Image (cartoon, coloured by chain):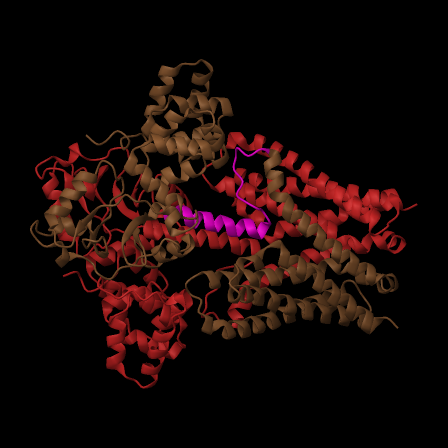
Chain colours: A brown, B red
Amino acid sequence: MSNPTENKEIRDLSKFDSEIYENISTLIENEADKSLVNLLADLHSADIGEIINHLDFDDAVYTFKLLDHEVAGEVLTELDENLRERLLAEIETDHIANIVDQLDTDDATDIVSDLPEQIKEQVLDKIDKEYSEDVKELLKYPEDTAGGIMNSDFVFVYESQLVKDAIEEVRKNAEEIDHIYYIYVLKDNHELVGTVSLKSLLINPLDKPISSIMEEDLVYVTPEVDQEEVARLIEKYDIVSIPVVDEKMIMLGRITVDDVVDVIHEEASEDLQRLAGLSEEEEFSDSSFRISRNRLPWLLIGLTGELISAVVLFSFEASIAQIIIASFFIPVVMAMGGSSGTQAAIVMVKSLTESEYWIRDSLKRIFKEFRVALLNATVCSAVLLFVTHYFFKAEVYFTLVLTFSLFIIMTNATMIGALIPIIMKKVGADPAIATGPLVTTINDILGLSIYLTLVTIFLIQ
Amino acid sequence: MSNPTENKEIRDLSKFDSEIYENISTLIENEADKSLVNLLADLHSADIGEIINHLDFDDAVYTFKLLDHEVAGEVLTELDENLRERLLAEIETDHIANIVDQLDTDDATDIVSDLPEQIKEQVLDKIDKEYSEDVKELLKYPEDTAGGIMNSDFVFVYESQLVKDAIEEVRKNAEEIDHIYYIYVLKDNHELVGTVSLKSLLINPLDKPISSIMEEDLVYVTPEVDQEEVARLIEKYDIVSIPVVDEKMIMLGRITVDDVVDVIHEEASEDLQRLAGLSEEEEFSDSSFRISRNRLPWLLIGLTGELISAVVLFSFEASIAQIIIASFFIPVVMAMGGSSGTQAAIVMVKSLTESEYWIRDSLKRIFKEFRVALLNATVCSAVLLFVTHYFFKAEVYFTLVLTFSLFIIMTNATMIGALIPIIMKKVGADPAIATGPLVTTINDILGLSIYLTLVTIFLIQ
């Protein structure tokens, strides 16, 4: 039959099926270890991880300790990061070493890298020598690079070998390596020269030389490549795994699509977080203090920015006192500048970070944004003119100045939103900075200044 | 050797290598068809697609017409949607039929579904009967469901067959089906009973019954399941393809991870777009008018909302005229309410749409958001109190009212941001609506009303 970790019942708990969760809570309460072990044995590690994420901390530790090494390792990779850290602090070093030993090198590296320095050394000392060397090697790469997400487990053959040798390699590694999609074909010095899909192995005669069926045009990355770039390549070329090589094409490891799916998700979350001014991803088990600490920095930066807006308004006190109606439209000019700037920034950042963008298009893009800005500013100003005149029945002079201000502010904000990402890219910074609250705040301040300056120039004698 | 479409040079053009692009432009200009065909023959379809996306329309059509059917099909799937539509309008129906005939059923369905009704019929009439039936079947499912992204090409064996029969099936389908990861094991009535990985086929004896090595605990979906849910399952269970079955477990098709990667990307883009108030994704080849039309609806909704804010301010005209300093802090209360509400909404939507959320946690979550709101509101109010008192040297009474207002507004906005997604989920609507400009605008209006009401109550005699 199939191996023990594969043969699990799939109970996707997110479908709000909390029955199992209740059962587990009851079993923990009654310390019914045996029944609990039996129940857990039927579940997929991803589901066990999800349950443990939702248990109280003591129950989480209790349940985790009941898992056997192999399952425990897989469950660890599913836990919220801060829960995992706290939980591992409760587990003996020997036990951690046994668990880590069962994992793929990339997952093992993730877990070991989060351990306190002293425990880390101890764990690395206790696990299999060769495996530990691999993990130490992987620990050198930054977390968000190809090296940081690759694993060193892959199946390879030498270019002089035959199809049957490759199949034999698959057989030998089948137990240890879960996901095998391609066999890598190497020279004697481990230089990568080709790949062969399992499909090719199946359909070709056993005694055919591997070099005659291998794919030689390769998509590969070096370890320092950003994980987002890895994801882009896998997405673009529709592949399920990508080899990682050094600058001499020596094979170092491979990255599989399941890790890339996580990367895409992570990067997308990061974009959303940035836009909302969250410092990092929040997890269910985070405390209120931790969440507050996560959200406060950007709130305080926003507060500072808006206090500068207040200073701007202060400096126009005389104008506002004289034309009180001007203050009623502060929300309009602020919000419209902010929105049009954010729209332009998001679209620009998206094309700067995705494949479709080429530097040679920059100028074209900026002109297009300018035309869009003029169009949208015209429409919105016309609506504002109409409403202010007919509904608010404001003075004609004021109406004209307000409308003209909105036009200038929207055009200006759109161009700022479009230009800042390009400038960031040119100086080598992350263009996405432009989508955060920082730029919205800058647009707020600029918008108010433009508005009140125009009001003062045209309406104050 | 390997098949013609696989053996392409990988020239990832996004690395701002525009040399090839210049060459192609020159060849088009000189109508050097033969050289152009040779140059294109060396490129991967994903790269050709990228180039065509950046050419002027006439050049794009010219280049596309030079591609052979097989490559043309793959390139079509890489093109910006509106360019594809315009380009296909320039191609003869016969040629379209030939191109579509080369594609996987899911890609063929995508392309056929965008054709004008009359052309669609003609194309379906001209392609292979059986294939055309498959495509017609797939056309029935909404684009963003499992049925909409599945394809009907998969390799299967009956449960009574042997490993060698499965290998024979792989061999027979190898040419036609690009990505084969699992063989599906079916009963005579095509009910799905198990899956076998290519790895298992390689390592097991040829005469072993397939039923003895198949995986019976299956992750599967029905065609009406949302594509986002499909992505979540593939991500959670680290799988590379998922079978689609009807309610009687009859096998209909499969979804491969490369399509899911696109889905994850698409959904992430959608979240960002929603947050920025963009109606749909913008593409490089979109005209200024199209882009403007995409951005205007939310700008106009925002304008309407802020005009309501202006009405609120109007109705407090007397208070503002009396306490002019109150108007200087309008940006502060608006922006802080908006930011804290958006932060809460994004975090809540994220956990509502991802696996970690369970209904039973709702109450816990809301309490946690409330505690976070109190913490952040306290810190920001304290900062505001300090700055207003020492820097702006405002009257003590006003300072206290302003600070108290900020506290109430931030707490209120956070709770609104957290609650609206939950309410949406309970009534079956999309929780993500809460992250759009709509809710920010509501928070703007509420924030201003709270602020000016408090100012009027406490400071106006």
Q: Residue at x 55, y 34 (%)?
A: A286
Q: From the viewer's perspective, is B296 left or right of A104?
A: right
Q: Residue at x 20, y 35 (%)?
A: B214
Q: Nearer the viewer, residue A143 or B5?
A: A143
- In this orientation, does residue B110 appear? yes
Q: Picture coordinates of residue A284 (x, y %)?
A: 52, 35
Magenta segment: A260-287
Q: Picture coordinates of residue A314 (x, y %)?
A: 82, 59
B309 over B190 or under it: above or below: below
Q: Residue furthest bottom?
A: B30
Q: Nearer the viewer, residue B177 or B372?
A: B372
Count of numbered badges drawn on the protein = 0
- In this orientation, does residue A56 appear? no
Q: Nearer the viewer, residue B58 or B110?
A: B58
Q: Picture coordinates of residue A232 (x, y %)?
A: 39, 57
Q: Nearer the viewer, residue B148 or A237?
A: A237
Q: From the viewer's perspective, is B171 left or right of A277?
A: left
Q: Residue at x 30, y 49 (%)?
A: A254
A192 over B48 or under it: above or below: above
Q: Quadrant of the N terminus of chain A?
A: top left
Q: Quadrant of residue B97?
A: bottom left
A100 over B42 or under it: above or below: above
Q: Quadrant of the C terminus of chain A?
A: bottom right
Q: Quadrant of residue B320?
A: bottom right
Magenta region includes residue B181: no
Q: Does the magenta stretch mainly form a helix, a strand or a loop? A: helix
Q: Residue furthest right?
A: B461
Q: Residue at x 69, y 40 (%)?
A: B411
